[in-house]
Image (cartoon, coloured by chain):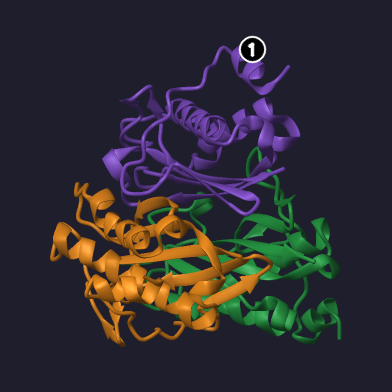
Chain colours: A purple, B orange, C green
Amino acid sequence: MDILEKIDALNLSLPDIAPPGGSYVSVNVRGMIAYVAIQFPILNGEYQYQGQYGNNLTLSDGYEATKLTALNILAQIEHYVGFNKIEGLNHIDAYYLAANGWDEAPKVVNGASDLFTQVLDERGRHTRGIYGVESLPRNFSVGITSSFTLR
Amino acid sequence: MDILEKIDALNLSLPDIAPPGGSYVSVNVRGMIAYVAIQFPILNGEYQYQGQYGNNLTLSDGYEATKLTALNILAQIEHYVGFNKIEGLNHIDAYYLAANGWDEAPKVVNGASDLFTQVLDERGRHTRGIYGVESLPRNFSVGITSSFTLR
Amino acid sequence: MDILEKIDALNLSLPDIAPPGGSYVSVNVRGMIAYVAIQFPILNGEYQYQGQYGNNLTLSDGYEATKLTALNILAQIEHYVGFNKIEGLNHIDAYYLAANGWDEAPKVVNGASDLFTQVLDERGRHTRGIYGVESLPRNFSVGITSSFTLR
């Protein structure tokens, strides 16, 4: 099964690519690395999962939110580079908004990590960092930056 | 026009390079990448734009603050590497301080993104992430980390 | 002296490697770069230095906390890659928790920066960024992400 077939087998699909939110590009290839701008949980242009975990959003919402964000990353890479040119995912940095004392972020970000592994197999192997921040654009509950090494 | 002439044509100039704020270096070349330590809006040694957007600082202040920060990045790269060795900018991560509910960060960070594009053309193409954080050293309202690919 | 001897000469030792806190890997080699997942001040499985600087933790605690975090980074690299394969450290991003108005983060993060330089010499040269965030997993007072270039 190729990557698009795997996404389909999970009853998922790549969302429309979101335009950049400013004067930058969504994917930048330099040398052997494709840098991907921060992606958010946007479904075909519709903003989703805005707010804070432990407040208006649950752990289960968060798992879906980071999965959707990961699908946006894959959509950008497929559109601007093509899966066939990818050696693999390098690292993801996940930034989230949460209520005081909420501590389920690792499980929330597994929504993205699990998807990358399920869809890309060995090419989805990655390291990550997760950080609770004060604010994100448009009050998105999570944003993820990433990069990929090219073949 | 070369890069310094373009900066001059915008009625701008490269500020004095700021020393590192601890036991690290300002620019680190490893392999084909030049990593640049976090830069702040410092003008020839003078700290500028300290505080929070939506509190003591406006959107217009923020645009100027990230532009000045971008000029500091360019000053470091020119001093330690030289513009002639640069293939291009990879990615920037911009961290800002803001009052609750303030949501103009993308426009603020365009001050840096626009400058990179105006001055470096295709070599200024970049991806970015933006994050509202709780605090930054010396209460700077913004800090930007970046890296460049070498020729 | 090799690197392990230098660590020993400082009366330090590499801690047990901490397992990843989710569905990712601790070290990911892609191309010529080894990416290291966020590391925390964990000593042989025991969580240390949880809380906020300027609240329950002092500057001196912080220096020790980032030093311990740096030792965890070195333990991961030695285990998964081996020091002999490392050209050098690239960049570190340090995220910390602090009380309002506390501004000693650069000195705190020197605990990591100094250790890298003492132990790895020229190969420990690095750039860095430091950011005060709202929360980190398990209320750790600091977390550090990093990457190394391979030979």
Chain for numbered disc 1: A
Question: Which residue occupies the foreground of this view, C58 or B144?
Answer: B144
Image location (x, y in percent) of residue B149: 57, 62
Residue B132 relative to residue C6: left or right? left
Total number of numbered discs in the rendering: 1
Q: Can residue B13 be seen in this view?
A: yes
Quarter of the view holding residue C73: bottom right
- On screen, residue A62 above or below A33: above
Image location (x, y in percent) of residue A33: 62, 50
Q: Mark 1 points at which residue?
A: A9
Question: Which residue occupies the foreground of this view, A2 or B101?
Answer: A2
Question: Which residue occupies the foreground of this view, B45 or A17?
Answer: A17
> For the N terminus of chain B, which image quadrant?
bottom left
Image location (x, y in percent) of residue C130: 45, 68
> For the C terminus of chain B, which image quadrant?
bottom right
Q: Residue at x 72, y 43 (%)?
A: A151
Quarter of the view holding residue A150: top right
Residue A121 relative to residue C64: left or right? right
Question: Type of residue at label 1?
Answer: Ala
